[in-house]
Image (cartoon, rainbow, N blue to C red):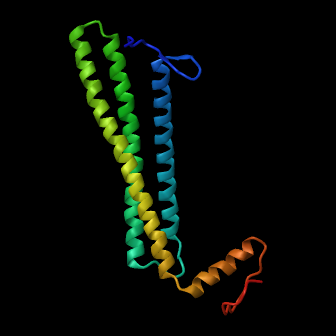
Amino acid sequence: MSEPTSTTSQPESGRKVQPQVLRDRSRASGFDLVKLLISLATGGVATYFIALTERPVPPLSSTERNTVFISILFMVAAVLIGLIGWGLDAAFFRYWAKSLESTNEETAKEHWDKRRKYNRWRLWAMRLLAVFFLLGVVGSGCYVVLRSRNSTPVERQECRSVEGTAFGGTEKTGNTGGSRQ
């Protein structure tokens, strides 16, 4: 059995990769994921805001309205937890650096303990961010299903007729369910 080294060999190419390079890539990937989830959750909240301030036809049922509010709460929670997670991430690395810079062993241990505490909190924050975002997406899906089931076939046909005008089609009035022109 061979001794572990500070580099790992990639069997395909024979090149050596430093573990820190892989950690840096992992951290950058995680950071990009957090940015993406926060952006998507913020966009979801904005979309729901528009949906609630417009006067949709037909009006939202109480179930649809409640589904929208629940989805908004999950998306807002995802945004807030993501921002808190970023702050915890910064604190984690700050205390890690302080523990390495410290010349006093006792102070270094205190900083290291704070680093471990912030690491636990940031990991929980990232998990909660993903859970709340997914719950918001599920709520959005429920809203779409409810909305499509609560509109009548005539209303859906009218929506299709109006959509056709945006893409160069002609708007139909008095639709009797005939073929599209």
Report the number of numbered marks. Answer: 0
> Which residue is painted at 45% across and 19% down in the image?
19
User: Where 146 falls versus 110 (above or below)?
Assistant: below
Residue 143 is situated, as x and y percent measured from the top left of the image, at: 45, 69
Instruction: Kindly identify the residue that appears in the image at 37 percent across and 41 percent down.
Output: 126
Residue that protrudes farthest toward the top in the picture: 103
Quadrant (top left/top right/bottom left/bottom right) for the C terminus: bottom right
Residue 130 on image: x %, y %: 40, 48
**Quadrant where the image shows the N terminus:** top left
Taking depth in this image into account, of 119 and 101 the one nearest to the observer is 119
Left or right relative to 180: residue 11: left
Above-or-below relation of 23 to 56: above
When the figure is inspected, residue 101 is found, relative to residue 148, above or below; the finding is above
What's the residue at 34%, 41% (across, down)? Answer: 125
- In the picture, measured across the screen, residue 148 lies left or right of residue 79, that is right
Across and down, in percent, residue 16 comes to 53, 15
Residue 151, percent from left and from top: 51, 82
